[in-house]
């Protein structure tokens, strides 16, 4: 069991089609397996972050940026987020291709967020592209990018990142 008096962690996410939500839930389960009390919720449902010892926040990448509601979450709670450990993650289907250029582009998607906070950990994960339920506009963007539907999420990478978070977020400096 975790020895922190306050071992509650908020995993807050924005998700357009469910892939990022599923990744956030996997991160939450992995943290729970390590003895943390985790609340996993959509950023639009979060009313405060002060009850949490740490926060993990994530968003899919659309048009090279985090979703507006995820950026708004960071802006709204930036003062509280600066007072507690924070990890952020971005999900993008383009990250199925491992290259320095794609990773730099994915990290650049967080630029607007990093103006407001200084996270202790950053995760970049490949997502999935499923055409069912997708808006026509998003579908056209994916087609123009030459994307072929599929699920590129690497659960061992995601769970490994989540397993490492407590050591990163709760490192005590003396």
Image (cartoon, rainbow, N blue to C red):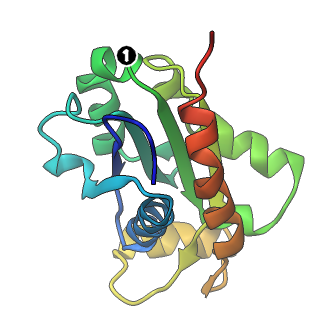
Closer-to-camera residue (139/104): 104
Name the spot of residue 99 as percent of width and height, x first: 88, 55
Give left or right: position of 39 versus 56: left
Closer-to-camera residue (43/165): 165
Is residue 140 positioned above or below 113 on the image? below
Count of numbered badges drawn on the protein? 1
Give left or right: position of 168 versus 80: right
Quarter holding the N terminus is: bottom left
Residue at the spot of label 1: 83
Give left or right: position of 43 versus 161: left
Closer-to-camera residue (137/26): 26
Name the spot of residue 70 as percent of width and height, x first: 34, 42
Name the spot of residue 71 as percent of width and height, x first: 36, 35
Secondary structure of the residue carrying numbered label 1:
loop
Whether residue 154 is visible to the viewer of this picture, yes or no, is: no
Q: Residues within 10 Å of mark 1 (few under 14, many from 20)?
A: few
Closer-to-camera residue (124/41): 41
- Residue furthest top as drawn: 174
Q: Residue at x 43, y 61 (%)?
A: 24
Is residue 107 positioned above or below 157 on the image? above
């Amino acid at each position: 069991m975790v020895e922190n008096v306050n071992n509650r962690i908020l995993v807050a996410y924005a998700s357009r089609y469910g892939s990022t939500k599923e990744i956030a839930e996997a991160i939450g389960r992995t943290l729970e397996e390590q003895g943390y009390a985790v609340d996993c919720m959509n950023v639009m449902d979060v009313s405060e972050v002060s009850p949490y010892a740490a926060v993990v926040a994530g968003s899919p990448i659309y048009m090279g940026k985090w979703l507006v509601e995820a950026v708004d979450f960071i802006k709204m709670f930036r003062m509280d987020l600066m007072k507690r450990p924070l990890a952020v993650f971005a999900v993008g289907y383009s990250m199925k291709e491992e290259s320095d250029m794609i990773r730099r582009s994915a990290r650049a998607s967080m630029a607007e967020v990093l103006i407001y906070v200084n996270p202790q950990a950053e995760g970049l994960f490949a997502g999935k592209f499923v055409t069912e339920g997708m808006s026509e506009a998003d579908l056209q963007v994916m087609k123009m990018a030459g994307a072929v539907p599929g699920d590129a999420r690497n659960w061992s990478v995601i769970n490994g990142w989540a397993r490492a978070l407590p050591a990163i977020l709760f490192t005590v400096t003396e």
